[in-house]
Amino acid sequence: AMDESAIPQNNNDLDAEKGLGCNVPLRFIVSVVYDVPGWKRGAWARRMTSGWNFATIYQAQSGMPMTVSVFGDTANAGTLLGENPIRADVTSQPLFPAGTQNATMWFNPAAFSTPAAYTFGNVGRNTVQSPGMQTMDVALTRVFPVTERMNLQLRAELFNGLNHTNLGTPNRYVNEPQFGSITMAMTPGREAQLSARLTF
């Protein structure tokens, strides 16, 4: 993911740094804009229902890759301040057994272990896929003429209109108690916004 270390864990083994970058293999976006036809039965009904514009954008994508790491310089490699390039070790346990891929346990913590002191981990860079994301934003607008030169635009918007929970990045540090769990959301829940704009 974007918060990965920018430096290698071992300058003498740069082949171990090969891996997926910010790879999102699946991404789907659709945008729709629709002028809502007015109800033509009666002048009052036509006036109230005509001129509305509906717009929506839907996005779905797979998760970003992330690296399972160790918090702190356990290899005593003298890393830079704010960088945690030391990675975990891989075990023989399955990564995504039944009961995983949720906020409590995104992956199996037993699939990784803390490397011995003064050693580098053997897990590959960006080898675990974090949660995907789905959002749909909706807007309904209408412009009302006030005078020949003045217009009033009313706009109602929904952000994350499906109220889908988009999980954040799992805790990737093998030597922390919350390792493998997710404690934040990537996007907020459904939000509504009403606005009016006067142009002249």
Image (spheres, helix red, strand yellow):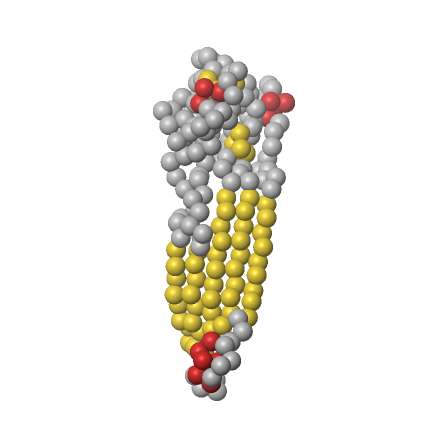
Q: Does residue 119 lie above or below 182 as drawn?
A: above
Task: Measuring from the top left, give residue 33's x and y in whole percent.
Answer: 56, 64
Q: How many marks?
A: 0
Which residue lies at the image location 53% right of the left edge and 57% below the top edge? 57
Task: Measuring from the top left, give residue 171's x and y in whole percent.
Answer: 42, 30
Q: Residue furthest left?
A: 177
Task: Measuring from the top left, give residue 66's x and y in whole percent.
Answer: 52, 32
Q: Quadrant of residue 74?
A: top left
Task: Measuring from the top left, give residue 195's x and y in whole percent.
Answer: 39, 68
Q: Does residue 112 lie above or below 105 as drawn?
A: above
Which residue lies at the image location 60% right of the left edge and 22% below the top edge? 16
Quick check: can you spot residue 193?
yes
In this view of the protein, which residue sits in the foreground, 126 or 183?
Answer: 183
Quick check: can you spot residue 81?
no
Which residue lies at the image location 41% right of the left edge and 26% below the top edge? 179
Q: Is residue 171 left or right of residue 89?
A: left
Which residue lies at the image location 47% right of the left edge and 66% below the top edge? 140
Q: Quadrant of residue 20?
A: top right
Q: Does residue 2 lie above or below 11 as drawn?
A: below
